[in-house]
Image: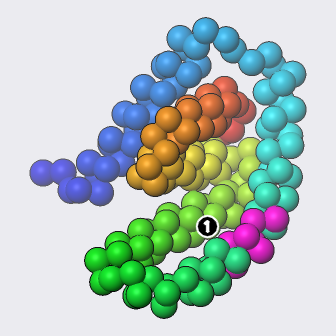
């Protein structure tokens, strides 16, 4: 009997296979090799810079949430609970995504498949976050574009 974690890993593997088929094998446009190589060479540096630049924004978001939370109590308990829950979920998703990307950076420099997988999981989490956050079109489009580039360079990671 399969465990739930095995089922989840299997589902992620199946999703990866489907995305590989449609974003690489059947993609109407494939990136040239020199573009892929450039992306692979600069991806770790871009990730590092974005991570460093994101830190003040994350701290600001946490501070603003702490500032606004007491005010929501005046809007009624239902709103306060709803705001609190949504904000907490958003911060958890953000934290997981940032942690995955930070852990992947050393492996991106070494072109390890494990690092590519971590970035893949972060991209999925960000896409789901956008959709859950009510930005259906933007979340789907952003995830699709990000995953397209990610799958185009997948073969460079071993």
Q: Is residue 135 above or below residue 76?
A: above
Residue for point 81% across, 67% down: 52
Q: Position of residue 30 (x, y in %)?
A: 69, 14
> Start and end of the magenta stretch?
53-59
Residue for point 66% across, 26% down: 152
Residue for point 12% across, 51% down: 1
Crowding near the residue tagged with mark 1, few <14, some 14–19, many ≥20 C-alpha atoms within 10 Å: some
Residue 108 in magenta?
Answer: no
Q: Main secondary structure of the magenta part?
A: helix
- In the picture as drawn, the residue positioned furthest to the front comes out as 75
Q: Which residue is mark 1?
A: 99
- In the picture as drawn, the residue positioned furthest to the bottom comes out as 70
For residue 148, which quarter of the picture?
top right
Element at label 1:
helix
Residue for point 59% across, 87% down: 67
Q: Position of residue 137 (x, y in %)?
A: 50, 35
Instruction: Specify whether 30 is left or right of 92.
Output: right
Q: Is residue 38 above or below residue 5?
A: above
């Amino acid at each position: 009997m399969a465990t739930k974690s095995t089922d989840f890993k299997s589902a992620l593997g199946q999703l990866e296979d489907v995305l590989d088929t449609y974003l690489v094998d059947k993609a109407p446009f494939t990136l040239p090799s020199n573009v892929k190589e450039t992306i692979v060479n600069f991806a770790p540096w871009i990730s590092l810079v974005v991570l460093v630049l994101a830190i003040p924004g994350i701290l600001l978001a946490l501070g603003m949430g702490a500032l606004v939370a007491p005010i929501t109590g005046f809007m009624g308990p239902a709103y306060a609970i709803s705001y609190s829950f949504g904000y907490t979920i958003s911060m958890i998703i953000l934290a997981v995504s940032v942690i995955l990307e930070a852990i992947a950076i050393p492996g991106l420099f070494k072109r390890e498949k494990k690092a590519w997988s971590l970035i893949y999981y972060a991209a999925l989490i960000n896409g789901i976050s956008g959709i859950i956050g009510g930005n259906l079109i933007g979340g789907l489009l952003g995830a699709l574009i990000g995953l397209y580039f990610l799958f185009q360079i997948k073969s460079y990671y071993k």
